[in-house]
Amino acid sequence: MILQIKAALRIEAGFVTPRVAWAWLLAVAMLPSLAPTALAEERVPAEGRVIKLTLPLETGQVSGTVTSYTQLTFTLTTEQGTPHRVLWNAILADKVELYWRYLEKPEGNAKAMFELGDLLIRHREGEARAKQAFDRALELDPGLADAVALSLANQEPDGTPRYVGTADEKMWGELSDQTMQQGIETLRSFAQRTQRELQTDLQLYESERFMLLTDVEIKEVEALSATLSKAYQAVAEVLDKDPTENVFVGKCLIVLFKRRVDYIRFQDQLHDTDARGTGGLCHGFGNGHVHIASFQRRNARQTRHVVIHELVHAYLHRHEGPRPLDDWVNEGLAEHLAHRIVPPAGENLYLKARLLLEGKKGLGDGFYEGENLQAWQYDIAGALTGYLLERSEKAYPKLIKAVKQGTPTDEALQSVYRMTPAKLTLRFKQRLDRELNKKLGG
């Protein structure tokens, strides 16, 4: 039986923060290889289950047969044998369900039905279909209740920086020349491994502080290099550090893909991470290394905005010590500097935050609660960071240092700025009102 359909790709706009266009890949090769997850499991269609498709890809209309698939992507192979990797969530939700049911025959199979629900829940148009699949999976196996709840809770991927492994305190502070050189060699080995496993035309470029592994044009490499230097100096100065010092272990390996699908594959195969729905992710490792991966945007300013945001995450992972920062602090500084150096189109952060908070109490649910920051609150965190710096540029690095050295964030805020979160929120919102009144007053 052959299923032959001409499908249309679904066009998606926007991305989930934190955003990135370059990737810092410092020491993954030093870690043991990660075991593949179910998401990474490559499957081939059972004998007789043939799907033929025609899709409008970047290179034009492509016709072929589905030759393999995972819960992230499927491979469409042409008659000439050319493979094209396509994201499941790039096609319409009803087609995703149709193809998956045809390939997996999930009726009567609780695990396969759960997988269908897990695939659909990550599709912007798949929620209703996903819940139907989950209900059927639970009928077949009530023991899947926890797995279903977890899948539903994570239908919008978390875009905050990932912390991986147990911190090795010796990898923070001043490092020996030998350790720094080992870091560089590790990066080169990982770059080679990435090239082998992804089989993508990636080129490696090196500078004094950075490595770039990419398939974008050389002019974009040069432009991003200049932006990185400017951003690195800016974050160092905000944190009262010497901008000529290298905070990284060796160098920073940056991975930038032309295509989003390659970014998704990279995160899946080499980071054991489901990056669907994200625009970029920063991983910080317990051995001191940081790495980020993302894909190129059509708008060059947006790409560079993303670069700066993720560079701040990378720097903060290396700053002072391994203790993670609360989301509102981490994302706040990243968005503040990204807006300051490469302002996007539209209003300034104060006005954006004021409009986002219209009619809301406080700064939104969970704002000060560690890792609970929601995507819409990132601009608010950026504006709040700008307000703290406006009040005192000398106090801000003391706040970050205190938290990094183990002081709870609320206590550090009280000690350095003499404000509780409630008082800070009140003063901040008053500042936003003044900004809005200034705008309305012309």
Image (cartoon, rainbow, N blue to C red):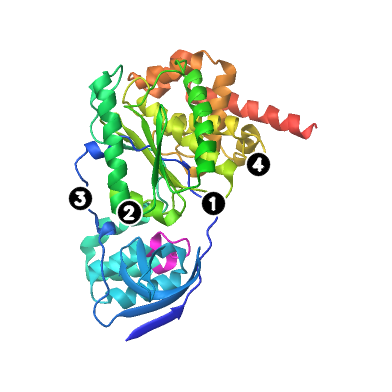
Task: Give the vertical position of 106 relative to 263 (above or below).
Answer: below
Q: Residue at x 34, y 65 (%)?
A: 117
Of the two numbered discs 1 and 3 on the same chain, state the one appearing first in sequence: 1
Task: Give the vertical position of 350 relative to 106 (above or below).
Answer: above
In the image: residue 260, left or right of residue 50: right
| Residue highlighted by disc 4 | 345
Query: Dot 1 lies on which element?
Result: loop
Which of discs 3 and 2 lies nearer the camera? The answer is 2
Q: Is residue 36 visible?
A: yes
For the residues labelled 3 and 4, say whether their Cβ atoms are less than 8 Å apart.
Answer: no
Of the two numbered discs 4 and 2 on the same chain, state the one appearing first in sequence: 2
Stretch of the chain drawn in magenta: 120-129
Of the two numbered discs 2 and 1 on the same chain, state the one appearing first in sequence: 1
| Residue highlighted by disc 1 | 14
Foreground residue among 226 and 122: 226
Of the two numbered discs 3 and 4 on the same chain, state the one appearing first in sequence: 3
Q: Position of residue 262 (x, y in %)?
A: 40, 54
Query: Dot 3 lies on which element?
Result: loop
